[in-house]
Amino acid sequence: MLSTSKVRRIVLVIILQFFFIFLGQCEENERAEILSQAIDFEQKLNAANLLMENNFDHGKDIWASTATECYNQIKMLRSANASGETWAQQMLEASSTNTLRFYKINRINKFDMYYGCSSISTKENNLEIGGRYCKHGLDILLNDSALISTEFASCFPSGCNKNDIKNVLKKLKTNFIASQTHNPYEVYMTIICQSTDHGFQNTGEIIAVVILAVFICFLMLSTICDVYIRMIKKDGDIKNIYLRIFREFSLYTNSLRILSTKAPQGNLPVISGLRFISMCWVILQHSYIHYLNHTTINYGDTLPWLQSWGSLHYLISGFAVDTFFALSGFLMSYIFLNQMSNNQKFNPLQYYFHRYIRLTPAVGAILLLTLFIFPRINLGPFWHSYMEDQKNHCSKIWWPMLLYVQNYVESEHLFCQDHLWYLVVDMQLFWISPLILYPLAKKPKIGLVILALCFIVSIIAPAITSAINEYSNDILLGFNKNSLDAAINFLMLPWNRAGPWLMGILLGYILANKKGQIKKTFMILSWIVAILALGFPFFSYRFYQSKIDQEPGDYYMYWEIFYSGFSHHIWGLCVCCIIFICSFGYGGIVNKFLSLPIFLPLGKISYSVYVIHITILNMIFSSTRVEYYFTQFDLVSTFFSMVIWSLIGGFIFCLLFETPFLVLDNIFRGKLTNVPSVQNNIRDVPKSSSAPTEFELECQSRDDVYTGS
């Protein structure tokens, strides 16, 4: 028989259950009411309502407070629309429809008649009226979660500038919030408008155009000179050193060098294959991000795909950068140690200058284009908003970018060509490389101790940082509240990404000092390690996929500590094992594939492809006229098209902004006293048994070093 106290407890539990059920139902009803009010407000932002109605502001015309030119054109638009004039109807039609669509999550994207808006040009009462294409966004949050997130594409009269439209939207927002009896939600609105000014206007833009024009004319003259001399004389007949140097800037000659598939003796062609495939993997990640987040109408349908095995190649694509770090450490270590063993002196000034002159011209060129040239190009409905955002960030961070310190200075503006964070981390690791490489060359035991200590730091530092800040490694899933903070303050710091780079240094030391052949059993063991390391990210990331359906905020500290501390090292181990195996002839079909001649020219332009590919992706996606409907086939076909366009853009960028400065670098080092041909564009290092001995001084090779001798 139940006691009185137990009966009371049971009754209390039943009462509490009914209470919480009732409370939950009330919250659902309240949420539905708020959603209905939000939809009403969203409908008011439709272009037809926004332009044609005049009673939003307590019976007053909301446009009356705007600039005179804007208000006059609004009145003309209303009058012309009432008269059925074509241009007015086109302006109203060149905006998003007002159909709300919810695809499993509350995300709505609307854009269409960009080109229709941009083409509007008419004259009313001796007043020129054109179309100004704008995107105004609306985000309504309830308890910090998105209730509605939508973007409108609207066409306004050209006399209305961004501030006019922004003030109208702000007034609408204020009136809407004031009209609600309770306001448990937050409303955020943004506005970005296309410039109607054509041509280059300010001094900076004009100077940039002049600099580019003079530079390209110089390259063209060099090309004409080179082609003319090839037609009438042989290379050996040219005695004038200045003429020979001038010819080295020829676009024709440098094109031949880039496209050459002849590998120098002792070259390790597997490096070019790894570099190019990793570059494609980076393009895959960024093209998928653009496709999924910018223009996908059925975004909710991507969630099942993100939980499947089929999405893992995208979700773990961040390891492609670790391949670059491993290659960078390996090439730098191997060449440095071989040069030092040949009694070459180490000159720190020339060591750092050589690296800086190899990297920086391409970075400076993309900054120049981003700040002054690209914003004047109108490519589509998303281009202006993207370039305005890029210009705002780049104008504040250009000098830290040229000094490779933007992850410490003005880090809130890292979104200026944000993919270049890799170059920053790689350069900062290069700064400290002599502290490891010089002892390895002179006092190997001390150098190995320093290298071991660096390994320990590279494991402990990211593990502790992730635990303290509750950073998760599911960055591409984007469901963790700290994803953005983790990307900036965790993944873009050198000590957190040094693992694969240190692996590469160790491999370079091993190959530079190894004598004779390696036992077959050791090679088999290396293959086993490489396969296990390759499989680790695929199977381990399934853990993050399983969290998609869980409540946000759950943090698995011990797993994150392990993953942060070891995952990058494990991938670096995989890359180094493959290089090690292939360098001794045990790579089999893997070595044959990665050593295909086609990868040599593709590897040469990989640096330029890396620098320019984000801009090319945005050019293509910005010109999109319709929204994408997500399918896996469309996703893959989009990726392949992006690779092709990126290679074309990278080849042109390499010819214009990379190879000319490689020629200058050779001039500074006295390498052009004799005319170099395609074949002697090689770095010679002393041979050491069976290990690779020479590396091509390629267009893309940022990883070779120059000790200064």
Image (cartoon, rainbow, N blue to C red):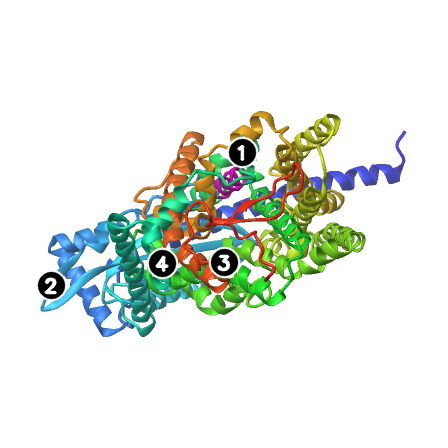
* Measured Cα–Cα span from mark 2 to mark 4: 59 Å
> Which dot marks residue 311?
1
Q: Quadrant of the N terminus?
A: top right
Query: How many labels, in total?
Result: 4
| Secondary element at image label 1 | helix
> How far from the left and from the top, in percent, is residue 66?
28, 71
Name the kind of residue labelled 3 in the image. Arg
Name the kind of residue labelled 4 in the image. Arg
Residue annotated with mark 4: 244
Few, some or many residues within 10 Å of mark 1 (<14, 14–19, 20+) = some
Which image quarter: residue 407? bottom right
Whichever of callouts 2 and 4 sits on the residue coming sooner in the sequence is 2
* Measured Cα–Cα span from mark 1 to mark 4: 52 Å
Whichever of callouts 1 and 2 sits on the residue coming sooner in the sequence is 2
Name the kind of residue labelled 1 in the image. Ser
* Measured Cα–Cα span from mark 2 to mark 3: 53 Å
Q: Are marks 1 and 2 in contact (CB under 8 Å)?
A: no
Residue annotated with mark 2: 123
Residue annotated with mark 3: 358
> How far from the left and from the top, in percent, is residue 274?
54, 39
Whichever of callouts 1 and 3 sits on the residue coming sooner in the sequence is 1
State the residue in front, 272 or 302.
Answer: 272
State the residue in front, 298 or 456.
Answer: 456
- Answer with left or right where residue 625 lies relative to residue 360: left
Whichever of callouts 2 and 3 sits on the residue coming sooner in the sequence is 2
| Secondary element at image label 2 | strand
- For the residues carrying marks 1 and 2, which lies nearer the camera in this image? 1
Is residue 463 rendered magenta in the image?
no
| Residue interval drawn in magenta | 272-282
State the residue in front, 630 or 525.
Answer: 525
